[in-house]
Image (spheres, rainbow, N blue to C red):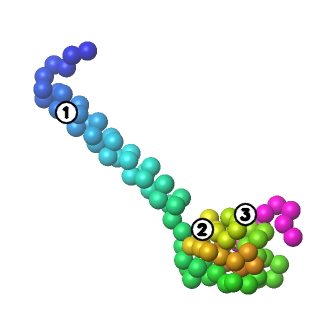
């Protein structure tokens, strides 16, 4: 396939570059969001349980002392506002 002129080729490359620029931030943003954690203060983290709720039984706990959402290390007996109990947790 040949393009009719250099102007058309330039327009085509410009259009492709615009499409890439429009799509790229979404991929990068998703990766950054997945990697970004909040501080213990922002999560209202405490190093002791809240009733029965504690990191050890939270779906976000990454043994031995990390969390998917909170900057670590954390305690397995800690708690924060993002607590979500694992199934069959007690
Ligand atoms: S309670 Fe909070 S700090 Fe602990 S594992 Fe769950 S989300 Fe992370």
Label of residue 69 in the image: 2
**Which comes before the other along the chain, label 3 or label 1?**
1
Alpha carbon distance from label 3 to label 1 = 50 Å
Task: Say which residue label 1 marks.
Answer: 11
Verify CB contact (< 8 Å) between mark 2 and mark 3: no
> Where is residue 59 shown, x and y percent of the image?
72, 63
Residue in view at x 38 percent, y 47 percent: 24
Q: CA distance from mark 2 to mark 1?
A: 44 Å
Q: Is mark 3 within 8 Å of ligand 1?
A: yes
Magenta residue check for 51: no
Q: On screen, 82 above or below 6?
A: below
* Left or right: 9, with 34 as reference point: left
Q: Main secondary structure of the magenta part?
A: loop
Q: Residue, x 29% and y 36% (percent of image)?
A: 16
Q: Of helix, strand and loop, which one carries label 2?
A: loop
**Picture quarter containing residue 88?**
bottom right
The yes-or-no answer for disc 2 within 8 Å of ligand 1 is: yes
Asked which secondary structure carries label 3, the reply is loop
Query: For mark 1, does the 10 Å Cα neighbourhood hold few (<14), some (14 to 19), or many (20 or more) residues?
Result: few
Contact flag, marks 3 and 1 (Cβ < 8 Å): no
Q: Which comes sooner in the sequence, label 2 or label 1? A: 1
Q: Which mark is residue 59?
A: 3
């Amino acid at each position: 396939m040949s393009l009719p002129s250099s102007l058309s080729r330039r327009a085509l490359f410009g259009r492709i570059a615009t499409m890439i620029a429009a799509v790229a931030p979404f991929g990068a943003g998703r990766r950054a969001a997945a990697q970004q954690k909040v501080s213990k203060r922002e999560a209202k983290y405490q190093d002791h349980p809240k009733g029965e709720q504690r990191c050890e039984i939270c779906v976000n706990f990454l043994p031995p002392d990390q969390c998917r959402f909170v900057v670590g290390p954390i305690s397995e007996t800690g708690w924060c506002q993002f607590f979500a109990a694992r199934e069959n947790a007690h």
